[in-house]
Image (cartoon, rainbow, N blue to C red):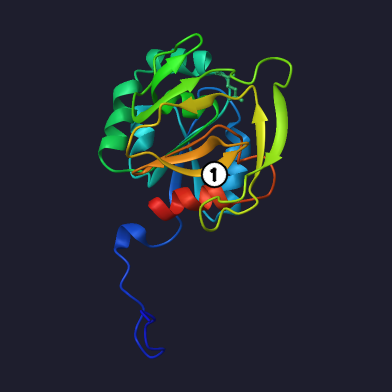
Amino acid sequence: MGARPASAAPPAEPSARAGRRRVGILAVQGDVEAHARALGRAGAEAVRVLREKDLDGLDALVLPGGESTTIAKGLARLGLYEPLRAFARAGHPMLGTCAGAILLARRVENHPVETLGLLDATAVRNAYGTQVDSFAAAADSGAAAGLEGLRCVFIRAPRLRDLGPDVEVLATVDGEPVLVREGKLLAATFHPELGEDPRVHELLLALA
Ligand code: GLN
């Protein structure tokens, strides 16, 4: 049911949608290049964002992992807090990974940083402690359709707690939410840009 007859013309694409999606990567600090490669694997064009003007015409934005304190200082220095909030309010999808997920959260524990305050969640920084500060794990069974077996690389990762009622958990590892969605916001506590699996970036593109 719902399939188009083979003879039907494909639906007209609005002109802004035609061609490759252009996705910004906040390029203050962090693993910008790995995200650019991951977006390329998912079929998008990656654009570095360092100024408000760089957001013009973008379909979506990635906030990469790195050091949230350093990225937050850069956002303040470059005057990017309000432009990024406005970009999200305008309905553009955003993917925050690790430090980027922290920057999306409304609340931060364990050395708070100023965030964009968009995602109804508390990010607990460096929540896995120093003993196991980096590890890889497969997502638990029960991940959202299409994300089965997602391999997650964690590097000094945060945990997400106190998720608001509109926050949907797309994947967990050991029962902890590691990939969540609230409207057009995606937050991953791991690094989907490492490795070859394009599914999280494809999810961002699907929201655009
Ligand atoms: N521990 C970092 C922070 O707080 C995040 C690490 C990462 O992005 N890989 O901010």
At 32% from the left edge and 39% from the top edge, which residue is drawn? 166
Q: Nearer the viewer, residue 188 or 143?
A: 143
User: Looking at numbered disc 1 in the image, what kind of residue is underneath it?
Assistant: Ala
- Side of 151 relative to 54 (left or right): right
Q: Which residue is mark 1?
A: 171
Q: Is residue 136 left or right of residue 146?
A: right
Image x and y of residue 146, in percent: 55, 58
Q: Position of residue 113 (x, y in %)?
A: 44, 13
Q: Quadrant of residue 122?
A: top left
What residue lies at 30% left-to-right and 29% top-to-bottom?
85
Place of residue 107 in the rendered image (x, y in percent of width and height, measured from the top left): 39, 19
Q: Which quadrant of the render holds ligand 1?
A: top right
Q: Quadrant of residue 16?
A: bottom left
Which quarter of the image is occupied by the N terminus? bottom left
Crowding near pointer 1: few (<14 within 10 Å), some, many (20+)? many
* Residue at 66%, 16% in the rendered image: 129
In this rendering, is residue 84 above or below 148? Answer: above
Front residue of 92/125: it is: 125
User: In terms of depth relative to the viewer, which is nearer, 135 or 56?
Assistant: 135
Q: Where residue 50 sits in the image (x, y, percent)?
A: 44, 27
Q: Measured along the vertical axis of the image, is residue 96 above or below residue 43?
A: above
